[in-house]
Amino acid sequence: MTVTSTASTAPPSGAEPNGSRARRPRISKRSVPYLLLAPALFFELLVHIVPMLGGLWMSFLRLNQFFLREWMSAPFTGLQNYRFALDFDGAAGVELFQSFAVTIAFAVITVGVSWVMGLAAALFLQRSFPGRTLLRGLFLVPYALPIYTSVMIWKFMLDRSDGMVNATLSDLGLGGERFWLLGNNAFLSLTVTAIWRLWPFAFLALMAGLQSIPTDIYDAAAVDGAGLWQQIRTITVPMLQPVSQVLILVLFLWTFNDFNVPYLLFDQAVPSSANLISIHIYQNSFLTWNFGLGSAMSTLLLLFLLVITAGYLMLTSRRSRNA
C-alpha cells in the first residue's frame, strides 16, 4: 500500500515541482530586442528629447529678463520670436543671417580641408616603413588632447605680443605685429584651430577605410601602367566613398554646431568675422536674457540641420543605387 501511494503523488520525470513553470513569466523572442533597447531609449528621452521639447515650448514664450523668476507664467506669443529672428529688415535678422553665412563658410572650409589632410596622411601611411606606427600616434595627438588644452595652446600661440606665430613671422621678416584674435584675422585663427583638432578624426576614419581595399587592385593597376594619381582617382577615392559620405556628414554636423572652439578662443568677446551661429544663440540667450528668442533660433538651426541631413542622405543613397 505504501508503494502505491508514493507513485501516485510523485511528479513525472522532468517536470518542475509545485507548478513553477506556470508562474514563471515567459518572454517572447520578438520582445527581446525591444527590452534590450528600452534603457537606451529611456536615457535618450531623458537627455535629449525632453530638453528639446522644453526648448521648443520656450520658443513660443516671451521668456525674457522680466519673466525669468516666474518662467511658468511667461506670456504665450506664438510665432513672434520666429518672426523677429527672421526679419531681415531688422537688426536681429541681419545679425542672424551674417552669423549663418560665417558658419556656412567655416563649416565648408573646415570639413573640406580636414578631409583632404586626412586622406593625404592616410595614403602616406598606407605603405609600411620604419616609424609608421610612431607617426600614426603623433598624428592622433591633436584629437586625443582635451579640447580645452588644445584650444588654449592655439590661443597662446596666436597672442599678439608673446605668441609663437608672430615671433616666427617676425624672424622671417614677414611682419609679426598682427592681431590674430581680432578683426578679420579671427576667422582664419578659428578655422585653423578647428582644422587642427578635427583632421586627425578624418585621418583615422579614412585609414580604416583604406584597410578594406585589396592591394591586388593596386598591383593590377600598376601592371596596366596606372600612375599614383590615377590609382588614387580611379580606385582609392571611389572605394572610399561609403566611408567619406558618413565622415563628411558627421564632420559637418560637428563643425556647424561647434561652440567650444570659438568660446574658448575668444571668450565672450567674439569678433563678428568669427561669430558662429552657436555663439550668436548663446549671446542672445545668456547675455541679453532673452531665452524665448534664443530658443527660436535654436529651433531654426535644428530644422536647418535636419533638412540638410535628410537631403544629403537622399542624394548619397540615390548615387549609391545608380552606381
Image: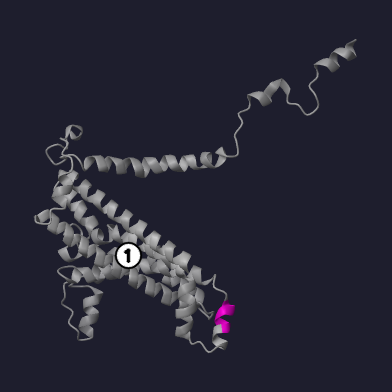
The x and y percentages for residue 106 are 26, 66
On screen, residue 268 versus residue 258, left or right, reads left
Q: Observer-nearest residue: 274 or 97?
A: 97
Q: Amino acid at mark 1?
A: Ser
The x and y percentages for residue 318 are 43, 63
Tell me which segment is drawn in magenta: 215-220
Farthest bottom residue in view: 225
Q: Quadrant of residue 2?
A: top right
What residue appears at the point 22 percent right and 81 percent down from the top-left corner?
Answer: 169
Residue ID for mark 1: 150
What residue appears at the point 37 percent right and 40 percent down from the top-left corner?
Answer: 46
Q: Is residue 140 above or below residue 26?
A: below
The x and y percentages for residue 251 are 36, 63
What residue appears at the point 22 percent right and 41 percent down from the top-left corner?
Answer: 58
Q: Which secondary structure type mostly characterizes the magenta part of the structure?
A: helix
Q: Residues within 10 Å of mark 1 (few under 14, many from 20)?
A: many
**At numbered mark 1, what does the secondary structure look like: helix, strand or loop?**
helix
The colour scheme of the drawn protein is one colour
Farthest top residue in view: 1
Specify whether residue 21 is in view. Answer: yes
Q: Observer-nearest residue: 288 or 299?
A: 299
Quadrant showing the N terminus: top right
Specify whether residue 205 is in view. Answer: no
Question: Residue 276 in magenta?
Answer: no
The x and y percentages for residue 30 are 57, 39
On screen, residue 46 versus residue 219, left or right, reads left
On screen, residue 70 versus residue 319, left or right, reads left
The tally of labels here is 1
Q: Quadrant of residue 250?
A: bottom left
